[in-house]
Amino acid sequence: MTNNFFYNKKADERYLSPWMFLIWCIIGVSIIIGVIQFYSVLADARVSEANTLNVRILDCLSQDFNYAAVSSMSFDIYAKCNLNKDVLESKNDYYYFNASIKDSSGKILYSIAKGVLNFDVMCKYGKIEPNFAQCKKQSLHVKDASDGKDYVLELTTASNQK
C-alpha cells in the first residue's frame, strides 16, 4: 500500500515566501535596534579614572612618607609611583593631579601639579558643567617616617577622557 497523502505533492514556494519575508524583516529590525541601543549608551569613565589615579598616588606617597625626600628637587613622582609620564602629560590633555603637603595648621609647605593645569578650575565647577573634567579630591593625615611630624597630604586628580 502506498501512502497517497505524500504522493504527487509539490513543494510550493508561494506559501513560504510571505513567512520568509516576515522573518527577514524581524531579523533586520532586531539588528538595527541592537546597534542603535549599543551606540546610544554613553560610557563615561572619567570619575572612575580620577578615583583610580587618586588612590594610586595617595597610596604611593603615604607609604613610608618622608617629607624631605618628597620635597627635594630630585624627587620624581612618576618613578616613585610607577606612573606613565607619556600618558599623564600627553598632547591629548586627559589627566591632571595636584599633590599638596600641608602642616598641621593647614599651611601649604610643598605642592606638585602635573597634567592640564586648568583642570584645577574645572574641578571647582565640574558638578555644574557635565562636559568638564571629573575630579576626585582627598586628604590623608600622614606621619613622617624620619622625624615623626604630622602632615596632611591633599590630592586632587582629574580625568577628561570620555
Image (cartoon, rainbow, N blue to C red):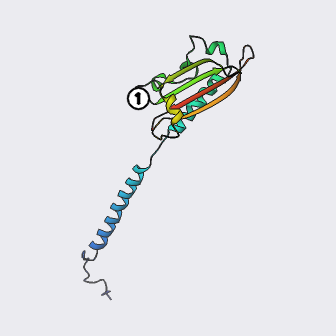
From this view, report whether residue 45 is shown above or below residue 5: above
Quadrant of the rendering where the C terminus is positioned: top left
Residue situated in front as seen by the camera: 15 or 1: 15
User: Which residue sits at x=40%, y=49%?
Assistant: 39
Residue 103 image position (x, y, % from top left):
69, 19
User: Which residue sits at x=47%, y=34%?
Assistant: 160
Residue situated in front as seen by the camera: 122 or 19: 122
User: Which residue sits at x=54%, y=20%?
Assistant: 78
What residue would you read off at disc 1? 92
Residue 21 image position (x, y, % from top left):
29, 69
Residue 96 lies left or right of residue 8; in this view the side is right
**As drawn, which residue projects farthest toward the right?**
148
What is the count of numbered marks?
1
Residue 148 lies left or right of residue 93; in this view the side is right
**Regarding mark 1 in the picture, which secondary structure is present there?**
loop
From this view, report whether residue 68 is shown above or below residue 8: above
Q: At label 1, which amino acid type do we have?
A: Asn
Residue situated in front as seen by the camera: 67 or 106: 106
